[in-house]
Image: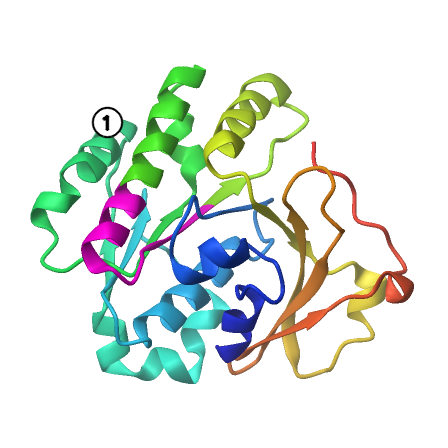
C-alpha cells in the first residue's frame, strides 16, 4: 500500500500537492467497468485508514458483491484499520445529497478521506447539468469543510464510468461539468494484452493509469498491478516502452 502513497504524492504529479495533502478539489478516477477504479479506491481507503488521522468515508449506491484485490492485502487484515473505514450506501441521488448536506452535523470526527464510488449511478437519475453541478459542488464543499475542521485535510476521490459511445451527449455533458470541480482526472484501463504478457507471473491483475490535468501538462502513465495476495505495485511507464498507445478519452 505504500506504493499508492507514492502515486498520489506531489513528486508524481497525480492530483498535485493539494490532493496529496488532502486539500483542494480532489481527484476524479475514470474508466470502464473492470478498469480497477474500485480496487484503487479501496487501496486509498486502506492507506488513509492507517495514517492515524480521521476515519475514511466510503460512499456507494450499493454494497459490493465481491471484494476488490486491494481488500485482500495484509493491511486490510488489520481490524483497527478496517474499523476506520465507514461504509455509507445512500440508495438515490436525493438521499446522497441529503447525506452530504448533513454529514457535518453527524460526523463524530472529521474524516481524512471522502470516497464516492460510481457517481454515474446517481447521475443516471437526471440528465441535466444543474443536478450534476450541485452534487459536484457539494462534494468539494464537504471535503473543504472537513479540511478546515481537522487542520490536516480531507482528501476527495470520486470514480466514474467513462462516457460510452451509446450515450455520448448526457454522459459527456456530465463529465464536462464534473471536470469544472474535479479538474484532475486519472483515466484507468486494463493493461493491453501484449504488454500484460511481459509482467510478472505473480501479478493477478494489471491496469494502466493515465493522468489528465488539462492542456500543457506532460503525459504521465503508470502500471498498477495486484498480486495474488492482493498487494499492489506501481511503476511508471516510459513512452519508449509502450507498444500500444492508449486511446484518447471520449
The answer to whether one can see residue 189 in this image is yes
Residue placed most toward the observer, 205 or 186: 186
Residue placed most toward the observer, 35 or 58: 58
Residue placed most toward the observer, 210 or 8: 8
Query: Tag count in the figure?
Result: 1
The answer to whether one can see residue 125 in this image is no
Residue 219 location in percent, x, y?
76, 51
Lateral position of residue 232 relative to residue 72, left or right: right
Q: Secondary structure at mark 1?
A: helix
In reply to whether residue 41 is colored magenta, the answer given is: no
Colour scheme: rainbow
Location of residue 6 (image quadrant): bottom right
Residue 234 location in percent, x, y?
63, 72
Lateral position of residue 112 relative to residue 12, left or right: left
Lateral position of residue 83 relative to residue 130, left or right: left
Q: Is residue 103 above or below residue 57?
A: above
In reply to whether residue 148 is colored magenta, the answer given is: yes
Location of residue 65 (image quadrant): bottom left
- Residue where numbered disc 1 is placed: 94
Quadrant (top left/top right/bottom left/bottom right) for the C terminus:
top right
Q: Residues within 10 Å of mark 1 (few under 14, many from 20)?
A: few
Provide the residue span drawn in magenta. 142-158
Residue 53 location in percent, x, y?
25, 70
Q: Residue at x 68, y 26 (%)?
A: 165
Amino acid at each position: 500500500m505504500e506504493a499508492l502513497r507514492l502515486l498520489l504524492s506531489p513528486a508524481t504529479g497525480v492530483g498535485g500537492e493539494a490532493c496529496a495533502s488532502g486539500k483542494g478539489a480532489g481527484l476524479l478516477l475514470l474508466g470502464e467497468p473492470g478498469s480497477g477504479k474500485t480496487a484503487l479506491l479501496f487501496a486509498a481507503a486502506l492507506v488513509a485508514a492507517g495514517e492515524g488521522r480521521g476515519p475514511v468515508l466510503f460512499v456507494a449506491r450499493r454494497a459490493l458483491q465481491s471484494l476488490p484485490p486491494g481488500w485482500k492485502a495484509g493491511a486490510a487484515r488489520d481490524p483497527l484499520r478496517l474499523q476506520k473505514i465507514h461504509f455509507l450506501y445512500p440508495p438515490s441521488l436525493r438521499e446522497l445529497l441529503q447525506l452530504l448536506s448533513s454529514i457535518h452535523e453527524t460526523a463524530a470526527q472529521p474524516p481524512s478521506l471522502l470516497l464516492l464510488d460510481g457517481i454515474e449511478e446517481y447521475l443516471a437519475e437526471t440528465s441535466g447539468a444543474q443536478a450534476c453541478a450541485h452534487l459536484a459542488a457539494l462534494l468539494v464543499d464537504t471535503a473543504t469543510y472537513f479540511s478546515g475542521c481537522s487542520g490536516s485535510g480531507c482528501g476527495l476521490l470520486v470514480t466514474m464510468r467513462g462516457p460510452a459511445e451509446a450515450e455520448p451527449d448526457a454522459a459527456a455533458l456530465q463529465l464536462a461539468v464534473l471536470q469544472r470541480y474535479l479538474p484532475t482526472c486519472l483515466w484507468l484501463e486494463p493493461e493491453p494484452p501484449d504488454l500484460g504478457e511481459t509482467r510478472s507471473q505473480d501479478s493477478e491483475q494489471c491496469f494502466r493509469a493515465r493522468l489528465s490535468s488539462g492542456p500543457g501538462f506532460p503525459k504521465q502513465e503508470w502500471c498498477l498491478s495486484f498480486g495474488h495476495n492482493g498487494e499492489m505495485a506501481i511503476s511508471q511507464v516510459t513512452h519508449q516502452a509502450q507498444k500500444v498507445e492508449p486511446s484518447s478519452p471520449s
